[in-house]
Image: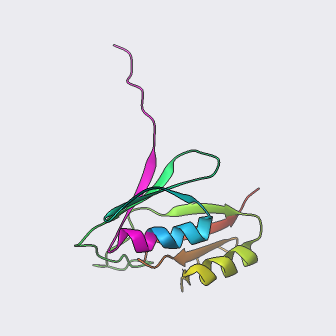
């Protein structure tokens, strides 16, 4: 029997409000909304590829970065390639991100989105 065909279509982030978090990433990335429902929003990159989706989770618990003993830790994070780390960081903060207090690397900047999900900006190349 041949292996089944598998294709990653999206990464989904839980949030207390899917539309609010999707609006943040729409401002940050400049992606368009592909689907918009009260508790589900999908964004699409201009050049195609996997989508970034958001779902409302009423029992959402904000992750802690970095997590200590007993803290709710991140389950995933986004790595976003940039061509200018300082300019991209300023843009991220202007769209609603917060620079994380803990920065584990000099050439990567960790930010928190409005729901607390960490994401990393790094120089592409």
| Left or right, 16 with reference to 6 | left
* Picture quarter with the C terminus: bottom right
Q: From the viewer's side, name the closer residue of 34 and 60.
A: 34
Residue shown at the point (62%, 83%) measured from the top left: 94
| Left or right, 59 with reference to 77 | left
Range drawn in magenta: 1-21
Q: Name the image quarter holding residue 95.
A: bottom right
Q: From the viewer's side, name the closer residue of 68 and 89.
A: 89
| Residue 17 belongs to magenta span | yes
Q: From the viewer's side, name the closer residue of 89 and 48.
A: 48
The percent position of residue 34, horizontal first and vertical second, equals 48, 53
Q: Name the image quarter holding residue 85.
A: bottom right
The percent position of residue 102, horizontal first and vertical second, equals 54, 82
Looking at the image, residue 103 lies above or below residue 81: below
Residue shown at the point (55%, 67%) measured from the top left: 26
Question: Can the viewer see residue 23?
Answer: yes
What colouring style does the render use? rainbow
């Amino acid at each position: 029997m041949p292996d089944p065909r598998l294709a990653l279509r999206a990464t989904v982030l839980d949030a207390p409000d899917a539309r609010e978090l999707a609006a943040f990433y729409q401002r940050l990335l400049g992606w368009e909304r592909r689907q918009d429902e009260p508790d589900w929003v999908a964004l699409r990159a201009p050049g195609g590829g996997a989508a970034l989706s958001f779902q409302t989770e009423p029992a959402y618990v904000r992750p802690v970065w970095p997590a200590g003993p007993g803290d709710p830790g991140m389950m995933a994070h986004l790595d976003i390639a940039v061509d200018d780390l300082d300019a991209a960081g300023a843009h991220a903060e202007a769209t609603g991100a917060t620079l994380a207090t803990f920065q584990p690397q000099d050439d990567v900047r960790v930010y928190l989105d409005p729901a607390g999900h960490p994401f990393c900006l790094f120089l592409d190349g």
